[in-house]
Image (spheres, grey):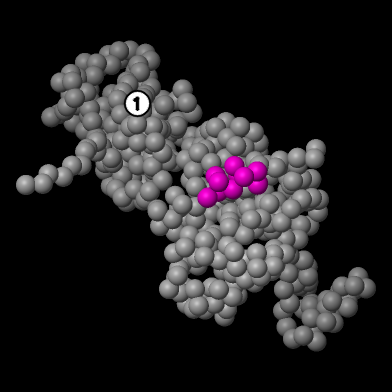
Amino acid sequence: MDDIVISVENLSKKYDLGVIGTGTFSKDLNRWWANLRHKPDPYAKIGESDHGNRVGKSIMALDDVSFNVSRGEVLGIIGRNGAGKSTLLKILSQVTAPSSGKVKIKGRIGSLLEVGTGFHPELTGRENLFLNGAILGMSKAEVSRKFDEIVEFAGVEKFIDTPVKRYSSGMYVRLAFAVAAHLEPEILIVDEVLAVGDAEFQKKCLGKMSDVAHEGRTVLFVSHNMGAVKNLCTKAILLSSGSKNDEGIVESVVSNYLSSQVPPNFQSEPIIINELGLTVESITINKEINGLVIPFKPATIEILVNSRNDIDYLSFEVLVSNVDTNGLLFATNAKQTKNIMTQIKTGINKVICQIHSFNLSSGDYQLGISISEPWVKHYYQNTDLLRFNVSETLMPDGRTLTLPVYGHVYLEHDWSIDYE
């Protein structure tokens, strides 16, 4: 129990929406006074309810969340946008108060939340650095000893005496992270703002957070980069709609999260082709692993066909497209690949397309099929029957690619340089 530095018990945060006045200050005051005495709205029109003027909706940003963090742990907090991750960090950083529940924290906190928090825009980088040190309870001499190291890490030597309101978002984040990490807080809290920095600085930040953890300090890390979470964190929690859905070993929690992001991997309605007496019952991709598609790993696409009769000459084509652009990335059929035609038997048939290496970068994709009798008749085509997500780009050697990936298909290749 002595090693627990953060204890969160039944934490909830409710935001009230739409509770606004509809008139002058004096009218709002009279409405408030009437409401206090359980009287009707004095300004309500006859036959009109005043309920909408006085009562707003609410949303639970966090709902009964509990967990503990021990000294030296690196806790990854993951979940979709709107899951409550940033709200949780703001409460732990004492930026906002909870609606209910308890938070116990042992030690000084250094926080890097969204861009714009923690620095005064009118002050220079130097002044903000010393101000943050003072907030952490450090003396001017203690901050001075760290000053050169912080400025060098952030790479803002030329601009340290410039007001931070003139900094680019990348410069701002670099200095903010350097200050938060180097002023030796017992607890370092980092939100997904690292996405603003360039790839080289992201690598430096991840390395620094690892160093902080190895020094016995505690790190809370929010990120959508699952590769970074798995490489850095020793434990993870999964938030969904304000509630804690999972907690434990990083690989298990990340796997649970990625699986939950995959939409149902079959079309909602059967495809009926009366002319052929044929029904496509379902289409799945990697159904053994809940539709999870991993780059550079095999993928199995299965088309379940129910036919009332034998069909000797039919072609099934698989189509893979990008969701954002609807641009076709890949198309194949058995005739093209194996120079064979698909023969359908009466009853249940499984038409299987085995992709040996699915070289897709991270993104959202859609899968469709085309059914035809080549050179005779085209019976069916739909490019958007099911969707799947590739959450991170894994290189063939197993490394997670954290750099931005341009394009959707990775072609295996090498680089070299020759000197004449």
Q: Position of residue 101 (x, y in %)?
A: 81, 50
Residue 78: quarter of image: top right
Q: Position of residue 209 (x, y in %)?
A: 55, 48
Q: Residue 138 or 106: which is nearer the viewer?
A: 138
| 117 falls in the magenta region | no
Residue 241 in view here: no
Report the magenta residues as a range: 208-218
Q: Residue 67 or 213: which is nearer the viewer?
A: 213
Q: Residue at x 74, y 86 (%)?
A: 24
Identify which amino acid the numbered label 1 is placed on: Pro
User: Principal SS element in the magenta part?
Assistant: helix
Q: Residue 341 or 413: which is nearer the viewer?
A: 413
Residue tagged 1: 298
Q: Residue 310 or 15: which is nearer the viewer?
A: 15
In the image, is residue 173 above or below residue 259? below
Q: Residue at x 48, y 34 (%)?
A: 264
In the picture, measured across the screen, residue 105 lies left or right of residue 285, that is: right
Q: Residue at x 87, y 73 (%)?
A: 35
Residue 108: quarter of image: bottom right
